[in-house]
Amino acid sequence: MTSISEREAGTDRETTARRLLDSSEQLSYDPVKEVDWETPLDTDYHGASPEWSTLYGTSYWADMTPEQQRELTRQEAASVASTGIWFEMILQQMILRDFYAKDPTDPAFQWALTEIADECRHSIMFARGAAKLRAPAYRPRRFVVEAGRIFKATATGEAAYAAILVAEEVLDVMQRDWMRDERVVPFVRTINNIHVVEESRHMKFAREETRQRLEGAGWVRRQVNALVVAIASYVIVGSMWNAKVYENAGLDGKRARREAKANEHHKSMLRSSCSGLMEFLHSAGLLTKPSLWFYKRANLI
């Protein structure tokens, strides 16, 4: 017999899904038409806000020429985009697996397919954007790729949706800065604007799914999934800035990696970007003492 709380949760979920579907119908973009793919890359622009560079604020940054700084931010933007593609492919498979053989008349089912369609377009957009930035294919380390393969095949419930939320929240804060920054090349600003608008709906869905899946969850389940989400967050954030961006920007890779690792400014930027996320995880009971170790290692808290 279905309890009152379960019926109410189902109604809330349906209402949220319908609202997101309506929003998607009213405000969605076609990157093929919206992004200026034809104009050649103008190297007088950055690829991302300089303040988000892993070297910004270091002695190496001060030693670099403006041209080197701009090239580095372009390579770093391409690296972040490539990591986004990797995780969006994981996300799509987790959602498909979650909604496999469920009721197709359910608005949540229809929203799940809408989100997958969005992510497919985003991945193509990111791929074309990285190519236009004249960057190679930045991929996570082999171990991370294989760990992602296991995660996408096994993560369920709140572990899957909270991990999705982490990746989307970190990207969202960065891209809100980039899309408003006139120092950033215009086509990248357009890409960021599209992603921010459409991902806001995805984040709403991920929050609602996380809350719903946690209803009635016991202490052990919360502890285990809090740790899974924290480890996933550590891996995702650690993969955003590929170590090869420095050589590809014409820099001394060894010095760059050493100074980037110790860069307190960049760590501070990451922490500030995740304040809202950490509040949500805390309210959901997913910010436990063991999980804090991974968030601190990832400079998210």
Image (cartoon, rainbow, N blue to C red):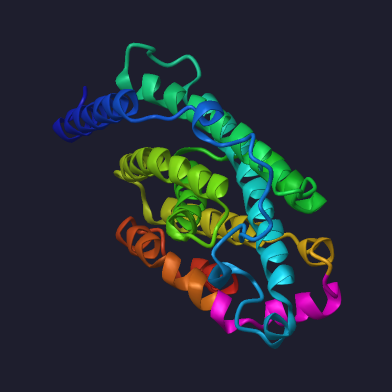
Of residue 147 and residue 269, the one placed in the foreground of this image is 269
Rendered location of residue 67, percent (x, y): 72, 69
Rendered location of residue 157, percent (x, y): 45, 39
Residue drawn at point x = 70 percent, y = 49 percent: 133
Q: Start and end of the magenta stretch?
A: 251-266
Direction from residue 188 to residue 202 in the image, left or right: left
Direction from residue 108 to residue 164 in the image, left or right: right
Residue 112 picture quarter: top left
Of residue 32 and residue 263, the one placed in the foreground of this image is 32
Residue drawn at point x = 35 percent, y = 62 percent: 276
Q: Is residue 78 above or below residue 104?
A: below
In the rendered image, is residue 301 in sight?
no
Q: Is residue 167 above or below residue 57?
A: above
Q: Is residue 184 above or below residue 111?
A: below
Rendered location of residue 207, percent (x, y): 35, 45
In the rendered image, is residue 122 in sight?
yes
Rendered location of residue 219, percent (x, y): 38, 56
Residue drawn at point x = 26 percent, y = 31 percent: 13
